[in-house]
Amino acid sequence: MRAVSRTDTGRVRVKNEDAVLIDPAGLYIVADGMGGHRAGEIASSIAAQSLRRSLSGAPFNPGALAEAVSLANQAVYEAARSRVECQGMGTTITLLWAAGSRGSGALIAQIGDSRAYLLRDDRLHRCTRDHSIVDEMLRKKLITPSQARVHPDRSVITRAVGVASAVKPDLFEWDRQDGDLWLLCSDGLTDMLDDAAIASILRSLPPEQAADTLLSEALERGGPDNISILLVSDAESGDTPPSRRGKEAG
């Protein structure tokens, strides 16, 4: 698998609290930190590095991934309790784990409102659901998608890594196919571009140019938040398994 990433402070924030991690062993992470002075970037970094350590050499299964997320949550939570400047910090986590051969598939872990998408056969699939007040309202059909994009609480999340002693991730399993393109991103991108705009860019450009274009479009539309983009392409040759929809793991 081949990966390309972009991360930017944006046009309003003074520092970048996002963390992007690419591990050649098949681990890809976007984390969007939050907290006080420098605490957001500390939380996202602690979580990403903890996940890398836990999953290095771990058996490729949902149980190992859930345990790794639990350990990352504990690491951020303990750091927040022990350091005055880090009190109240936390982070989102969106993780793609695609260790081993394509036949072993891919696992996704999600906490917060960073997202994972899959472009397959020119169709964009949203692989995760936001842990946010607005997304819950959308699922209950209390508001429309257009209302959600301007809702005053659209950045309020209901679940994060490190803010409590335990947290439950959403876990999903997907197959892998030749030509798949995965996108992991922070809400600095999705607050500025809707799914149709993202899909159009991913369909029309190779990953390097697509990453640049997604970033420039988000900045041109205001860039009020940090923006992180991680594109992972599955472009090996050979036969591919039959398609199936992603299913929730566990």
Image: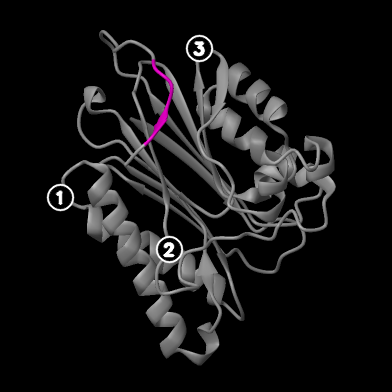
Q: Position of residue 107 (x, y in %)?
A: 34, 38
Front position in the image: 17 or 134: 134
Q: Is residue 221 visible?
A: no
Q: In which quarter of the image is residue 46?
A: bottom left
Label 1: how many Cα within 10 Å (few below 14, some 14–19, many 20+):
few
Q: Is residue 247 above or below residue 88?
A: above
Residue linked to disc 2: 167
Q: Residues within 10 Å of mark 2 (few under 14, many from 20)?
A: some
Amino acid on which disc 3 is placed: Asp
Residue under the image location 69 percent in, 55 percent down: 133
Q: Is residue 162 magenta?
A: no
Which mark is on residue 188? none
Q: Which residue lies furthest to the top in this view?
A: 239
Residue 103: percent from left, percent from top: 23, 22
Query: Are the residues tagged 3 and 1 within 8 Å (C-beta)?
Result: no
Q: Say which quadrant the C terminus sits in.
A: top left
Residue at horizontal 23 percent and vertical 50 percent from the top: 64
Give the amino acid type for the residue marked by disc 1 in the picture. Gly
The residue wearing badge 3 is 121
Q: Verify CB contact (< 8 Å) between mark 1 and mark 2.
A: no
Distance of mark 3 from mark 1, alpha carbons? Answer: 32 Å
Circle 1 sits on which residue? 57
Mark 2: which amino acid?
Val
